[in-house]
Image (spheres, helix red, strand yellow):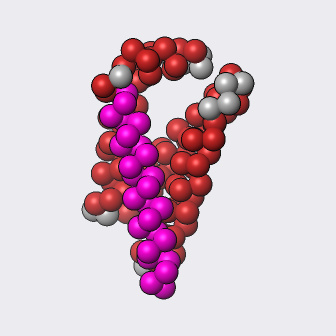
């Protein structure tokens, strides 16, 4: 069980840093991010709300105040990353591995969270 907890915190920590890094980039490098988002076929106005959602989602996952909020945060990240992978594959820009790696961390974090912290 100790190995599962360590793996959970490693995966969750790496995922959190990845998403917080992305949100930071969205806020402080808006022009480049907006250009990439538009190149992928999405409107540029989504950048700031997406950054805020990522910060709120990580907060929900790490604070463990509400199981429901945590589940919604995991679901939101799942859909965000699936869309990111699909958009990059569709664009053919070869940028999908970062999103796929984040998805792997998300799945490991979620699976171990359910195993370790769910009521028996």
Residue at position x 72%, y 24% from top? Answer: 92
Quarter residue 84 falls in? top right
Quarter residue 61 falls in? bottom left
Q: Is residue 42 magenta?
A: no
Magenta part, dominant SS: helix
Counting from the top left corner in percent of width and height, residue 109 is at 49, 62
Residue at position x 31%, y 26% from top? Answer: 27
Observer-nearest residue: 67 or 59?
A: 59
Q: Is residue 32 visible in this depiction of the protein?
A: yes
Q: Is residue 61 above or below residue 83?
A: below
Q: Is residue 66 visible in this depiction of the protein?
A: no
Observer-nearest residue: 28 or 62?
A: 28
Q: Is residue 78 above or below residue 48?
A: below
Quarter residue 26 falls in? top left
Residue at position x 54%, y 48% from top? Answer: 102
Counting from the top left corner in percent of width and height, residue 3 is at 49, 80
Tell me where the magenta segment starts and ends, as one range: 1-26
Count of residue discs:
0
- Left or right of 119? Residue 80 is right
Counting from the top left corner in percent of width and height, residue 87 is at 64, 28
Residue at position x 44%, y 74% from top? Answer: 6
């Amino acid at each position: 069980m100790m190995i599962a907890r360590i793996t959970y915190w490693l995966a969750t920590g790496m995922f959190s840093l990845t998403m917080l890094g992305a949100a930071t980039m969205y806020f402080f490098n808006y022009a480049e991010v907006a250009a990439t988002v538009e190149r992928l076929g999405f409107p540029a106005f989504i950048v700031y709300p997406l950054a805020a959602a990522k910060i709120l989602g990580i907060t929900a996952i790490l604070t463990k105040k509400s199981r429901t909020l945590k589940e919604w945060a995991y679901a939101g990240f799942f859909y965000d990353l699936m869309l990111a992978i699909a958009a990059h594959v569709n664009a053919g820009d070869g940028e999908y591995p970062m999103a796929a790696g984040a998805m792997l961390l998300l799945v490991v974090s979620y699976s171990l969270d359910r195993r370790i912290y769910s009521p028996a």
